[in-house]
């Protein structure tokens, strides 16, 4: 398949110590990134990751960033990767900022840690009853009808993500979640998982302001040195201000993967390299239908590293 290659950093995937610890210990690309992270952070990332119990803890997020970039390093070294464009989906924007040259790795680590602490404090005091639910095989018309009913009741909701024509992320109060699940089942859909804290919702404007005023101002963010596409509309991120806005948009704007797919196709991209723990984007119908997909993830990389020892 001719055409250009894009590198895609996915949203948060499995990053607990049990899921990625061996990869971080044995993979040479991960070891180099971990060593640099330890120097920047002033402590052992692996030790803190081992102690973490929250799927979205500060050090789980740091491990995801480290591993996404380590896997990109592996792709460049072993696959001869020369991507023409870069995309970061949701949390993957942080890795995209580093890979594209908009941020230094050390600054991205410290920024990620600060953002995680701000998020934890915010959700300890705000929107404690809100969750984000992901589901598939649900017609858009049926979802819109349900959301209209919520609006008529003055009930809160936000669409947090459009992942495919029938795959969505929706944020609602936890008390409403059983209603949403019943609708999904009734129309032949399938519920995936529920996220706590919630993500990508317009109601989180205050968190966006806090991170803009208290976190991003501390770090140098430059114009990307390669084309970057925004995960909320597929637009080109070409300036430092646009990259800063993109990092903030992830807080209160929905992700729109079909729009990104259209933008990639418009740039003659035919191959995706998805670098990071990912159980989602590589499996979506609109991904598989439009691209030749190479998934570079910790389990596969670890098998390659360990194979010589098993012979």
Image (tube, grey):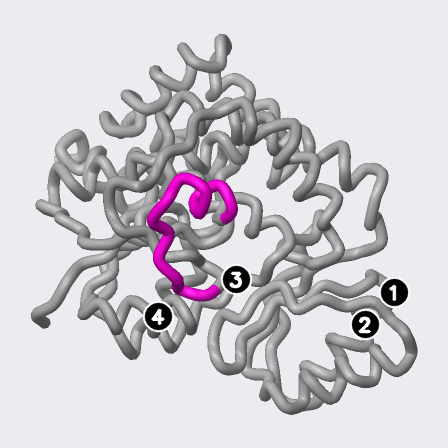
Reading the image, the residue beneath label 3 is 255
Tag nearer the camera, 1 or 3: 3
Can residue 12 be seen from the camera position used here? no
The image shows residue 37 at horizontal and vertical percentages of 40, 19
* Towards the viewer: 13 or 97: 97
State the mark number for residue 261: 4
Q: Which residue is mark 2?
A: 178
- Report how far apart the C-alphas of labels 3 and 4 lie in the structure: 12 Å
- Residue 160 is left or right of residue 67, and the answer is right
- Label 1, label 4: how many angstroms apart (C-alpha)? 34 Å
Question: Viewer-proximal residue, 70 or 201?
Answer: 201
CB under 8 Å between discs 4 and 2? no
SS at mark 3 in the image: strand
Asked whether the beta carbons under mark 3 and mark 2 sit within 8 Å of each other, the answer is no
Q: Name the foreground residue: 136 vs 216.
A: 216
Measure the C-alpha gap from mark 4 to mark 2. Answer: 32 Å
For mark 1, give the secondary structure. Answer: helix
N-terminal of the pair, mark 1 or mark 3, is 1
Are there few (<14), some (14-19), or many (20+) residues within 10 Å of tag 2?
few
Tell me residue 91's x, y (percent): 50, 46
Mark 4, other Cα within 10 Å: few <14 / some 14–19 / many ≥20: many
Q: Earlier in the sequence, mark 4 or mark 2?
A: 2
Instruction: Kindly state the secondary structure of the residue where label 2 is placed.
Output: helix
| Image mark count | 4
Magenta region includes residue 26: no
Q: Which residue: 71% across, 48% down?
A: 197
Q: Earlier in the sequence, mark 3 or mark 4?
A: 3
What stretch of residues is rendered in magenta? 233-245
Please tell me whether mark 4 or mark 2 is closer to you in this view.
4
**Is 243 inside the magenta-drawn segment?**
yes
């Amino acid at each position: 398949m001719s055409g250009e290659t894009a590198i895609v950093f996915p949203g948060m995937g499995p990053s607990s110590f049990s899921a990625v610890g061996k990869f971080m210990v044995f993979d040479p690309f991960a070891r180099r990134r971990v060593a640099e992270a330890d120097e920047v952070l002033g402590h052992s990332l692996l030790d803190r990751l081992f102690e973490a119990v929250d799927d979205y803890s500060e050090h789980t997020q740091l491990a995801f960033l480290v591993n996404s970039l380590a896997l990109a390093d592996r792709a460049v070294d072993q696959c001869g990767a020369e991507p023409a464009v870069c995309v970061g989906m949701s949390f993957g924007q942080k890795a995209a900022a580093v890979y594209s040259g908009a941020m230094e790795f050390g600054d991205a680590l410290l920024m990620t840690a600060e953002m995680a602490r701000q998020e934890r404090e915010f959700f300890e005091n705000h929107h404690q009853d809100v969750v984000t639910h992901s589901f598939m095989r649900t017609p858009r018309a049926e979802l819109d009808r349900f959301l209209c009913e919520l609006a008529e009741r003055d009930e809160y909701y936000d669409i947090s993500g459009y992942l495919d024509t029938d795959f969505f992320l929706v944020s609602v109060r936890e008390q409403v979640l059983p209603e949403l699940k019943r609708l999904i089942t009734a129309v032949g859909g399938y519920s995936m998982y529920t996220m706590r804290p919630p993500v990508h919702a317009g109601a989180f404007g205050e968190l966006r302001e806090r991170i803009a005023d208290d976190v991003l101002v501390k770090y140098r963010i430059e114009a990307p040195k390669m084309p970057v596409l925004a995960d909320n509309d597929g637009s080109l991120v070409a300036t430092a201000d646009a990259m800063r806005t993109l990092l903030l948009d992830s807080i209160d704007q929905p992700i729109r993967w079909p729009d990104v797919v259209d933008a990639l196709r418009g740039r003659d991209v035919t191959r995706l390299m998805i670098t990071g723990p990912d159980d989602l984007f590589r499996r979506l119908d609109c991904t598989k239908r439009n691209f030749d997909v190479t998934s570079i993830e910790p389990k596969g990389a670890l098998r390659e590293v360990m194979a010589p020892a098993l012979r």
